[in-house]
Image (tube, helix red, strand yellow):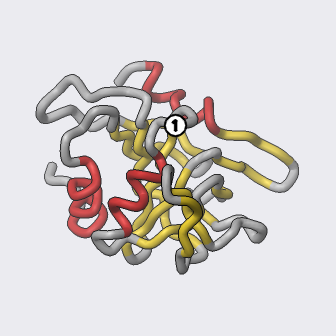
Amino acid sequence: MSDADWTRLAAFLHRSEEGDYLRATGVAMGDRGLAIIGASGSGKSSLALEMMARGARLISDDGLWLDGANRMHRPRTAPAMIEARGIGLLQAEPVAGAALIAVVDLDREEPDRLPPWRVTDAPGGPVALIRGRAHPCLGPALCQYLAQGRAE
C-alpha cells in the first residue's frame, strides 16, 4: 500500500466541531455504501447515476457526514436531487445513510488488472480504496461489489 492511498481520503475530508464532512457523492445498495471522490468534473455524479440505474440509491450528491463507525450520513440540508450534466438536476429518493464499504477515487487510474487490496484511512478506521479513473465498466462492477463483495 502506498502512502498516497493511505492518505487519499484526507484531501476530501473536513473536520469540524460538527463532525467529519466528506466532499463526495454517496450511493448505497442496502446498508453497504460507497463514497465517490474526485476533482470537480471527474464524473462523480455520472457514476452515481449509472449505479442508480442499476439499483443503487443516492445518499447525497455533494457531500456526506462520516461518523467514527465509518457510516455515511446524508446532510439534513442536502437536496433530494442529483446533477446530470447537460440535462439538469434530477429528482432522487435518497436514503439517510449506509456503512462506508469503500472509497472510489476517480482521479486515479488502476494500473493492475487484478489489483491488490488498497485501503485508505477513514475516521472509523481503514476502508477499501478503488482507483476508478478510466475504468471501462466501473458502474456495473461497483454494483456487483456492493451486492456480493470482492473475492479474497
Q: Mark 1: which secondary structure? A: loop
Determine whether, in the image, residue 100 is placed left or right of residue 20. left
Where does the image place residue 128, in percent across and percent down from the top left? 37, 44
Quadrant housing the N terminus: top left
| Residue shown at 21% from the left, 66% from the top | 148
Determine whether, in the image, residue 127 is placed left or right of residue 142. right
| Residue shown at 43% from the left, 68% from the top | 28
State the image quarter where residue 51 is shown: bottom left
Few, some or many residues within 10 Å of mark 1 (<14, 14–19, 20+): few
State the image quarter where residue 94 is shown: bottom right
Image label count: 1
Where does the image place residue 118, in percent across and percent down from the top left? 33, 35
Where does the image place residue 33, in percent across and percent down from the top left? 44, 63
| Residue shown at 46% from the left, 36% from the top | 42
Q: Please state which of residues 13 and 82 is positioned toward the viewer in this rendering.
A: 82
Most extreme residue toward the right is 17
Residue, disc 1: 41
* Residue 71 seen: no
Badge 1 amino acid: Gly
Picture layout, residue 128 above or below residue 89: above
Determine whether, in the image, residue 57 is placed left or right of residue 147. right
